[in-house]
Image (cartoon, rainbow, N blue to C red):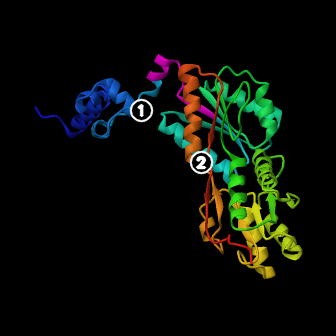
Amino acid sequence: MFASPLCIEHNSSMAKSNARLPRLEDVAERAGVSHQTVSRVINNHPNVSKRTRERVEAAIAELGYRRNTAARSLVTRRSQTIGVLASELSQYGPANTLLGVEQAARDAGYFVSIAALRTVNRDAIFDAIRHFLDQSVDGIVVIVPHAETLSALAEQSPGVPIVAVGSLGSDTVSGAMVDQKRGAELAVAHLIEQGHSRIGHVAGPQDWIDGVARAEGWSMALREAGLADDLLLVGDWSAGSGYDIGRKLAVERTATAIFVGNDQMSLGLLRAFNEAGVRVPEDVSVVGFDDQPESGYFIPPLTTVRQDFEELGRRCMDLMLGAIENGDTTSTIVVEPELVVRRSTAAPA
């Protein structure tokens, strides 16, 4: 007796549904390694040789292995999820900090749950943290543009680790940040080395931690060199505010060099100078901050301070994983910035 085509198709479907999914032990057997080694590869542990890692990754791809997060959560009592609280994501810095943290979390085997605040206030921060706790997150990363965010966190005792990115942290919160003051000092030192003695600063909003730190670094570098720090103008991070300030500076001509708090304001400043016939760098040198991808294509290409957001994300997750795995006390990690010299700076005429 022959089975009908319908019967064959039905039996084939049942066989597929009953097939056992590949397990970690199957990967270990196929790669010829221990299951601990497979676990190290999956969790991106550094103590695995390149050859072994490639063999395990080939076995994973061949078998179609996927980590059973639900089963692992039952064993470890962890959700493998990190909550990320962020605001001001329309700005280059916070947006790329979020991308760096999210990538680092995925590399470490964690999912990310994101809460983006439209308005930064105490109630909104508390609501977001309660939302994360309802999801049983293993920890919370807070991208902190404003000082009041850190103040609100100090009132919380969520029972999970918190890492504040963009801050030194506090007695209860770990911190991971790019050294903003150092970045400003690098910018000013470069201009002084070029021979400038009258250096102004177009600062970001002074209710932002980064805006304050960059202004302080500019002022400190000038005072240590015995130069005046009395040319400070405040923008709002936008190219439009840089343009408005640039028009004023083009008329007053009170400086031979300008350190600008971010690349977007630098873009507006360069346009204002161009329209007024102020040559960059022949008449005025300009240094920005961030090194966003377009900065090398400004006219002229912009000298700026680079922030390594990928490294910041990795260091943030190092703090978080240390707190989750080992119960480490609060600590701080600082990532060094880098000056990228292009054609918008030169010796004064």
Relative to 308, say whether 42 is above or below.
above
Question: Is 156 displayed left or right of 41 in the figure?
Answer: right
Residue 80 belongs to the span the image colors magenta: yes
Question: Is 175 displayed left or right of 227 in the figure?
Answer: left
Disc sitting over residue 45 in the figure? 1
Q: In which quarter of the image is residue 5?
A: top left
Name the kind of residue labelled 2 in the image. Answer: Phe
Name the kind of residue labelled 1 in the image. Answer: His
Camera-nearest residue between 4 and 308:
308
Q: Is residue 203 visible?
A: yes
**Secondary structure category for the residue under label 2:** helix
Q: Quadrant of residue 65?
A: top left
Residue 218 belongs to the span the image colors magenta: no
Q: Is residue 91 visible?
A: no
- Where residue 243 appears, x then y in whole percent? 80, 69
Quadrant assignment for the N terminus: top left
- Where residue 325 appears, x then y in whole percent? 53, 22
Relative to 321, say whether 294 is above or below.
below
Quadrant assignment for the C terminus: bottom right
Q: Which residue in the structure is indicated by mark 2?
A: 309
Q: Which contiguous range is marked in magenta? A: 71-83
- Where residue 205 appears, x then y in whole percent? 82, 52
Relative to 339, say whether 247 is above or below.
below
Relative to 198, say whether 56 is above or below.
above
User: Is disc 2 in contact with disc 1, using a CB cutoff of under 8 Å?
Assistant: no
Kindly identify the residue that appears in the image at 64 percent across and 25 percent down: 161
Kindly identify the residue that appears in the image at 27 percent across and 34 percent down: 10
Camera-nearest residue between 31 and 285:
285
- Where residue 295 appears, x then y in whole percent? 63, 65
Kindly identify the residue that appears in the image at 73 percent across and 58 percent down: 188
Outermost residue on the left side: it is: 1
